[in-house]
């Protein structure tokens, strides 16, 4: 584990904590929410390092964040959105959109289009991973109720 | 406890609860669940509700087939995840704590009045968030300082525009534009500043995380109307950020 990775994870944690305060999360939940940001960004970086596949890394990062939130939500009986919303923030393609606009303004239309497409794909991937987890969680809960 | 609440009072109480959760940014699926839960706990099993991000419609029937209907239009929405959590918990606990309708109503109003963090704290953490995201996306420690400053300004500006009843599109576009302008402005005076990283860090404060998550969760729960509405909201916010930063960049290149 190199220090660069660790420091990046730390930055993601503190950044997520700041965002969580803006969403009015309080007390011990703040700690767990920031940890969610760390899990998402950490796993994203690790997978990206190993495979160099952008969308796969995003998918796994968001998947772990939503899984983590789902588990915490069930344990503490807190709405799952509380943890997911802030946890995925570092993965949301705000930077890609900005770079796309920056390229477009400089006249590189093709580059801008490619980046926009990438932003759309990243957003779609995040959506799919949240959808997968919430669907399976619902099925699991249904089974538990029936048994 | 078995003092039963009147039919119309019941509809009113359920609507009020739903309104608080919806205005704090709860999923419509959760809001519908809460309506049903509250009504069932107070002895009205027959409830139908239809909730969208902009309105609440509900009908309650009693045993003699009398019906009370309530409609509430929701105009403003904000993000207050703590309120969603505390109201959900209160609704879950009605049975176990054996709350009477009056007690419940009282506690709900106390929770509804609970305010957000004081402005200085919000502003401070806005700065922290922006600056650490700037570092995360490859900024240096110089960028960190500028991003902290811009993050503070963005949160203040955001609140100001929200109070002035600007719409959500304009707020995000103007905040994006402001971030680009200050970053570029600082870049002309300080050498070696990576303005891109600073802007990216501050933009993360505006990103529509809640709208994206709600859109997906609503759609997956079968709430197609709400899911689509939230998706459009998220999309428009993203477009607004792109438009704001893009036009400010263009202006900067034109005049500088």
Image (cartoon, helix red, strand yellow):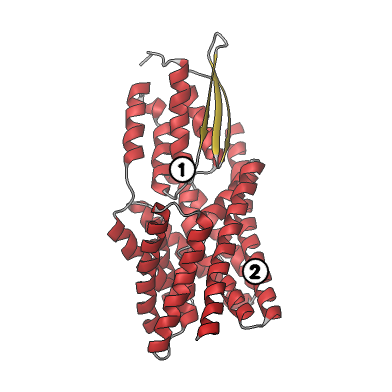
On the question of residue B88 being in view, the answer is: yes
Q: Are marks 1 and 2 on the same chain?
A: no
Question: Relative to the observer, which residue lies in front, B183 or A4?
Answer: B183
Q: Is residue B228 left or right of residue A83?
A: right
Which residue is label 2 attached to?
A55
Residue drawn at x 49%, y 42% is: B75
- The location of residue B56, given as percent across then percent down, is 54, 34
Q: Is residue B10 above or below residue A99?
A: above
Q: What subunit carries mark 2?
A: A
- The location of residue B181, given as percent across then percent down, is 45, 76
Say which element carries label 2: helix
- The location of residue B83, given as percent across then percent down, is 39, 43
Which residue is label 1 attached to?
B23
Residue drawn at x 51%, y 32% is: B72
Question: Relative to the observer, which residue lies in front, A61 or B190?
Answer: B190
Say which element carries label 1: helix
Classify mark 1: residues with Cα within 10 Å, few (<14), some (14-19) or many (20+): some
Question: Relative to the observer, which residue lies in front, A145 or B84?
Answer: B84
Q: CA distance from mark 1 to mark 2?
A: 33 Å
Residue drawn at x 51%, y 81% is: B252
Q: What subunit carries mark 1?
A: B
């Amino acid at each position: 584990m190199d220090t660069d990775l660790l420091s990046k994870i730390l930055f993601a944690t503190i950044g997520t904590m700041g965002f969580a305060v803006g969403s009015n999360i309080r007390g011990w939940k703040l700690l767990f929410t920031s940890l969610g940001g760390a899990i998402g960004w950490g796993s994203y970086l690790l997978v990206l390092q190993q495979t160099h596949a952008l969308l796969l890394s995003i998918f796994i990062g968001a998947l772990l964040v939503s899984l983590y939130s789902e588990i915490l939500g069930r344990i503490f009986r807190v709405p799952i959105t509380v943890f997911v919303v802030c946890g995925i923030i570092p993965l949301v393609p705000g930077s890609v959109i900005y770079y796309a606009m920056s390229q477009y303004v400089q006249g590189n239309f093709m580059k801008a289009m490619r980046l926009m497409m990438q932003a759309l794909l990243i957003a779609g991937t995040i959506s799919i991973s949240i959808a997968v987890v919430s669907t399976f969680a619902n099925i699991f809960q249904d089974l538990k109720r029936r048994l | 406890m078995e003092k039963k609440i009147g039919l119309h009072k019941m509809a009113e109480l359920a609507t009020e609860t739903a309104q608080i959760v919806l205005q704090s940014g709860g999923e419509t699926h959760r809001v519908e669940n809460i309506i049903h839960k509250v009504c069932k706990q107070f002895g009205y099993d027959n409830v139908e509700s239809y909730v969208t991000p902009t309105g609440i419609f509900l009908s309650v029937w009693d045993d003699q087939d009398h019906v009370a209907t309530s409609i509430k239009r929701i105009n403003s929405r904000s993000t207050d995840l703590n309120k969603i959590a505390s109201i959900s918990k209160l609704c879950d606990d009605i049975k176990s704590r054996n709350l009477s309708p009056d007690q419940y109503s009282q506690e709900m109003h106390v929770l509804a009045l609970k305010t957000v963090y004081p402005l200085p704290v919000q502003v401070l953490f806005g700065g922290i968030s922006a600056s650490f995201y700037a570092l995360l996306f490859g900024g240096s420690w110089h960028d960190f300082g500028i991003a902290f400053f811009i993050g503070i300004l963005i949160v203040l500006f955001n609140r100001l525009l929200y109070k002035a009843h600007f719409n959500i599109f304009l707020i995000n576009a103007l905040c994006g534009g402001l971030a680009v302008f200050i970053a570029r402005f600082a870049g002309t005076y300080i050498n070696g500043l990576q303005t891109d990283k600073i802007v990216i860090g501050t933009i993360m404060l505006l990103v529509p995380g809640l709208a994206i998550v709600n859109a997906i969760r609503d759609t997956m729960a079968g709430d197609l109307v709400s899911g689509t509405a939230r998706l459009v909201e998220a999309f428009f916010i993203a477009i607004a950020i792109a438009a704001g930063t893009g036009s400010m960049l263009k202006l900067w290149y034109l005049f500088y």
